Amino acid sequence: MSNTEISVLENITQILGYRPDFFGCDLRDMKQLEEIFEKYDFDGVVHFAGLKSPRESCDRANEYFDNNITWSLKLFACMEKYGVMKIIFSSSAAIYSTQGMHKKGLDENADIWNTNHPYGSTKLILENILWDLAKFSWFQVISFRYFNPIWAHTSWLLWENPVWIPNNLFPYIMKVASGDLDYISVFGNDYNTHDGTGIRDYIDVNDLVRGHILWYEYFDTIGQNVACFEVFNLWTWLWISVIEAITSVSNVLWKDISYVFEDRRLGDLAEVYCNPMRAKNILWWTSKVTLDESIKNTLYYHKISA
Ligand code: WQD
């Protein structure tokens, strides 16, 4: 809850048609965690919690290690104690190093030993820990390496709405489009890319959610009491630069979006995009939502008319 509001729960209730059980539990609080595991007969865990800004992690490395790693260990210990072995873990494309970049995009075997910032390191270390838990404690692990998740739920009830000024590109562009902010800073125009600005693979959050549900069902195909550790890139194969992102929003809204070029941002890479073939071959999952649809889904929240 460090970067959201409890009111979100009401909107989730509206979507589901019932109020899900909710505990404002700090993962440091082992006692409360155990009480929750005691109360329910969980089938598995989907572990999304964590700090997630590459730039911020460069200034607050220890806090990232503590928050993302130490507290996750408590969760894993609790799972083992209560015999809950399935886990879907939110890993990151941030664990890949630049050396792995090539024309077909990063596949799951790309080099992961040279992370660019503490955030990426936390995800890499957690993947290693989960690997060992699969090998020695019979955990069933699916680790998703997200690229750049964006946008809003199609119900128009949930959207990316950070309490603070957004760090990420698309929420920031929308703040400029809605008039809340005057312009966007483009961090670096001297990268070795076609227009000099950073390239990323942006994935719509609805595709991401569909992927999680599908992959959770994948556990059934491997059966009980069989250890497993699988990693998948979550992908679109839609790779765009910062300038192309700004232009896309501008074209959908028929609005000029002001930007200025600034120095490169600490911890940033020129290009991060993935090769989707493993997920496609094994799970027959592909992204469906187009960038224009994603942009339109979010207009309502930003009180913009196209
Ligand atoms: C995208 C591009 C910036 C803001 C994200 C997540 C991270 C991880 C990896 C899952 C870069 C440029 C941005 C701005 C800009 N995902 N930019 N002006 O850093 O790729 O990281 O993906 O684990 O959690 O945060 O995403 O949206 O911040 O940046 O020019 O005001 O946009 O330099 O090239 P990033 P981002």
Image: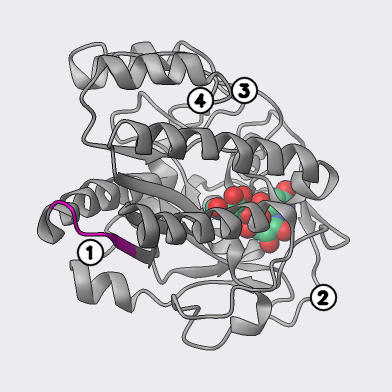
- As rendered, which of 143 and 212 lies closer to the eye? 143
The mark closer to the camera, 4 or 2, is: 2
Q: Are the residues tagged 4 and 1 within 8 Å (C-beta)?
A: no
**Label 4 – label 1 distance at C-alpha:** 33 Å
- As rendered, which of 161 and 51 lies closer to the eye? 51
**Label 4 – label 2 distance at C-alpha:** 34 Å
| Residue in the image at 36% along x and 74% along y | 276
**Relative to 220, is 101 above or below?**
below
Q: Are the residues tagged 4 and 3 within 8 Å (C-beta)?
A: no
Identify the element where label 4 is drawn.
Answer: loop
Residue type, label 2: Asp
| Residue in the image at 88% along x and 61% along y | 263
Identify the element where label 1 is drawn.
Answer: loop
Question: Badge 1 is on which residue?
Answer: 285
- As rendered, which of 205 and 59 lies closer to the eye? 59
Residue type, label 3: Ser
Q: From the top left corner, tell me how far across and down residue 102 is, in percent.
A: 56, 87
**Label 1 – label 2 distance at C-alpha:** 35 Å
Question: Badge 4 is on which residue?
Answer: 303
How would you rate the neighbour count of disc 3 (Cα within 10 Å): few for under 14, some for 14-19, many for 20 or more? few
Region in magenta: 224-229
The scheme the figure's colours follow is one colour
Question: Badge 2 is on which residue?
Answer: 190
Q: Quadrant of the N terminus?
A: top right
Q: Earlier in the sequence, mark 4 or mark 3?
A: 3
Question: Badge 3 is on which residue?
Answer: 2
How would you rate the neighbour count of disc 1 (Cα within 10 Å): few for under 14, some for 14-19, many for 20 or more? some
Q: Please identify the residue farthest to the bottom as the structure is shown.
A: 103
